[in-house]
């Protein structure tokens, strides 16, 4: 079972690609949700007030993928899709790639635009630090304090990460484990006497 994915560690540094006196500035950002997209693009609008087009594509998720490609006024499918194509070819997700174009007075034509946006997106992703992350599953485990030792023994043995814990007479801990171990972890706690587990 595949339980890893590739994304970028942090926002990439700005790249510049020039084509027939048009300038294409490229940026890549790690994102977790669609709500993050607009503020990032708004920031780039402030950075490049003279730009005409702020074209972008993003991809979020691993199993249930959400993606969008936006040409922002360029001819249909000449900007957003070439950018998205590079996201696909680098095999990354949870990412937004924005290419800001400052028009240089010479029209590039459809083929020229596709090539320019694709090249700028490729250069942007090549400059980004791509990392591998695991797909994680979260569980909540509930138990009485008297059972704490047997619960904690499994947590330690199976090397699961505790996200939060509430230790009182009735205890709750939230844990994270890699997807490929999730079923085994669930079964161990589910079979324990007086211990409840549920996936979050």
Image (spheres, rainbow, N blue to C red):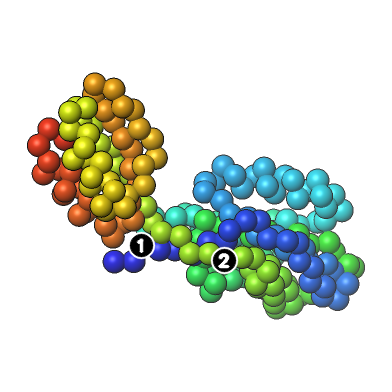
* Residue 196 visible from this viewpoint: no
- Quarter assignment of residue 181: bottom left
| Mark 1 secondary-structure assignment | loop
Where is residue 59? Give x, y as percent.
52, 58
The percent coordinates of residue 10 (x first, y second) are: 62, 56
**Which element is circle 2 on?**
strand
Q: Earlier in the sequence, mark 2 or mark 1?
A: 1
Numbered label attached to residue 130:
2
* Mark 2 vs mark 1, CA separation in Å: 17 Å
Q: Which residue is mark 1?
A: 3
The residue lying toward the viewer, choosing from 89 and 136, is 136
Q: Position of residue 27 (x, y in %)?
A: 70, 60
Residue 71 drawn at (x, y percent) = 66, 60
Question: Where the N terminus falls, by quadrant?
Answer: bottom left
Q: For the point 66% across and 56% down, which residue is it? A: 11
Q: Is residue 33 left or right of residue 19?
A: left
Quadrant where the C terminus sits is top left
Q: Foreground: 177 or 61?
A: 177
């Amino acid at each position: 079972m595949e339980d890893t994915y590739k994304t970028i560690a942090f926002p990439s540094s700005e790249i510049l690609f020039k084509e027939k006196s048009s300038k294409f500035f490229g940026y890549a950002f790690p994102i977790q949700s669609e709500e993050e997209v607009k503020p990032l693009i708004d920031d780039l609008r402030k950075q490049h007030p003279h730009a005409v087009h702020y074209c972008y594509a993003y991809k979020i998720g691993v199993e249930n993928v959400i993606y969008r490609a936006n040409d922002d006024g360029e001819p249909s499918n000449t900007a957003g899709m070439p950018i998205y194509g590079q996201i696909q070819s680098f095999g990354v997700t949870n990412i937004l790639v924005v290419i800001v174009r400052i028009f240089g007075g010479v029209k590039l034509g459809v083929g020229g635009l596709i090539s320019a946006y694709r090249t700028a997106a490729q250069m942007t992703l090549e400059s980004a630090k791509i990392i591998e992350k695991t797909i994680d599953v979260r569980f909540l485990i509930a138990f009485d304090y008297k059972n704490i030792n047997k619960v904690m023994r499994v947590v330690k043995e199976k090397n699961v990460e505790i996200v939060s814990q509430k230790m009182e007479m009735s205890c709750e801990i939230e844990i994270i484990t890699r997807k490929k171990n999730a079923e085994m972890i669930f079964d161990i706690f589910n079979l324990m006497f007086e211990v409840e587990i549920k996936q979050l």
